[in-house]
Image (cartoon, rainbow, N blue to C red):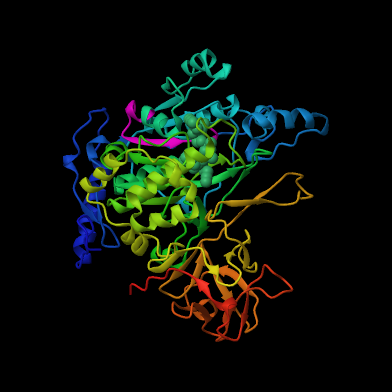
Amino acid sequence: AGSDNVMQVNNKEEFRGKKAAIAAALQGNQIDDDTNLEVNEVEEVIGEDGIMLSPYPKSRLKRWEEAPFVKPEADGLPGEMGKAVNIPIEQEKLMLDKFQENQFNLLASDMISVNRSLTDVRFEKCRDKSYPTLLPTTSVVIVFHNEAWTTLIRTIWSTINRSPRPLLKEIILVDDASEKEHLGKKLEDYIKTLPVPTHLFRTENRSGLIRARLLGAKHVKGDVITFLDAHCECTEGWLEPLLARIVEDRTTVVCPIIDVISDTTFEYIQASDMTWGGFNWKLNFRWYRVPEREMARRGGDRTAPLRTPTMAGGLFAIDKDYFYQIGSYDQGMDIWGGENLEMSFRVWQCGGRLEIVPCSHVGHVFRDKSPYSFPGGVQNVVLHNAARVAEVWMDEWGEFYYAMNPGALNVPVGDVSERKALRERLKCKSFRWYLENIYPESQMPLDYYYLGEIRNSETSNCLDTLGGKAGQPLGMGYCHGMGGNQTRKSKKTKKREKKRVIPISQVFAYTKRKQIMSDDNCLDAAHPRGPIKLIRCHGMRGNQEWTYDSKTRTIKHTNTGMCLDKPETGDVWKPVLRPCNRSRGQQWLMQVDFKW
Ligand code: LR7
Ligand code: MN
């Protein structure tokens, strides 16, 4: 609360009345043509939680009817109703060969109908919901680089088959300089046969998904832009709840639940409705469990829109005018990555909101690695994009990104002045505001005294996560000064027969809550003589509270009263707890700045 577009209501009656009036207006006003009226007819209403909503201009809305159910193919092709496709053993070699090209099982995809049926994965309550009889139209924008034929065409058909026809203005395809034959003339001819206007634009040179989407968006004639990856399948009733939410508030950016289409069998697997989007210190997007706080805000209703701190990036709908008003995308980002966090931070910080609408489900083929080239090198591209996010939106928390990726300091970030000016112009709030109000569960500590390596005075080695996951013991290693990016190769794992690279992080934060954190884990000790483990931070002090004394340089564990000590001779890479004794092995170097 307390900003320009957020306003508390005291009078609940007044708000009910307004809401009812708007709802009636939305239902009653029948407009069938495509006149694009200005946005100034927007009236503001106040939502349940006392936050101002900007509902959709009435005159733009369209009457619609539910899309018919897609029946299973009569000729019994594999994969119907979203079932897994199993490849006969004699075709296994062919399957593996074909896998390389797209990093998913193309042989399986090619066996499935481009019109395949899926089960209705929605909650019962979603099926019973009724949406306004008038909704805005949308253009579906799909960008691709070297996408396989069947996955692309299935994305298109699932959109056509499962969207109420009056609401689907058009499909816009953007070919980002693909080199595949089937994406040339064949595709041009094919889309002419489709029952929904479908337009194909091509980037001249490989421009990356961000600039490709900008090209697509430029041609959009619908009122809402809906972006999809080129290997998706839309399910029953996916579109209506997204559009209905935007009608309630046109500054809401909405995502469906992204279900999983298996990259190996093309089975349609329902994803959890209990996860939302977050990010780690390296600025990787991550799914996390929805906290109780957000469940409570929704009154425990699992069909209610879920406010998410970040989005995955590929699948979302946004009012077209709002897309531009809020700054579309950062043109300076290349190929892949970063744009999803950039948009998430921007939308929240600049007065919009970002939600997952659990009644909307769209499947996506998740793959283990990228099938295409990254001109300029994967690392450089990804570091460059993320650095732009850190520079423009994250204020002092950008420090975490650079601490984890010191290599990013050598990658030119380019000119970010325009994006900074945008932030100014839109009077966007600070990253601290975002962390406090939108994402208090984030692993970015609000206040911290130190961020960097923790070096032992006697051995000159550094605390190190050794790449361990939550629950693993804390380790030590030669100080590498590489943040979270130093890697080591593990022995070949028996199961997969492939080399795995494990990131080792020597970056820790010492926080105002007296935690020693590494990303979402904290140093934790339950017994006076160890072991010291990395455990998911709980923020409740207890076994995770440590006091650093910058004079004696000791790190003392509050609960046990013991001091962190260099490893004992037995296990030279495991620091331990011992009675405090002022030895050099108990001295740790941190440039702690006690600001508070
Ligand atoms: O240079 C390129 N040009 C393109 O047109 C590179 C890619 N693309 C296309 C590509 O063909 C595809 O259709 O862009 C789309 C997305 O690329 P993917 O499928 O390789 O990306 P992804 O699914 O691995 O990545 C997720 O994060 C990306 C960050 O930039 C984008 O936001 C993707 O849209 C996004 N996908 C999703 O959100 C789906 C759920 C995955 C998750 C988590
Ligand atoms: Mn994808």
**110 left or right of 515?**
right
- Magenta span contains residue 455: no
Residue 547 visible in the current orientation = yes
Residue 229 image point, x, y percent: 49, 35
> Which residue is painted at 21% across and 52% down in the image?
21
Q: Which of the pair 156/106 is nearer the observer?
A: 106
In the rendered image, the residue lying farthest to the right is 90
Residue 236 visible in the current orientation = no
Query: Magenta region: which residues?
Result: 216-236
> Which residue is painted at 34% across and 25% down in the image?
219
**133 left or right of 586?**
left
Label count reads 0
Q: Which of the pair 400/38 is nearer the observer?
A: 400
Q: In which quarter of the image is the N terminus?
A: bottom left
Q: In which quarter of the image is residue 565?
A: bottom right
- Magenta span contains residue 233: yes
Residue 44 image point, x, y percent: 20, 51
The image shows residue 137, relative to residue 368, as above or below, that is above
Residue 450 image point, x, y percent: 43, 67
Q: In which quarter of the image is the C terminus?
A: bottom left
The image shows residue 270, relative to residue 538, as above or below, that is above
> Which residue is painted at 57% across and 84% down in the image?
562
Q: Quadrant of residue 529?
A: bottom right
**350 left or right of 83?**
left
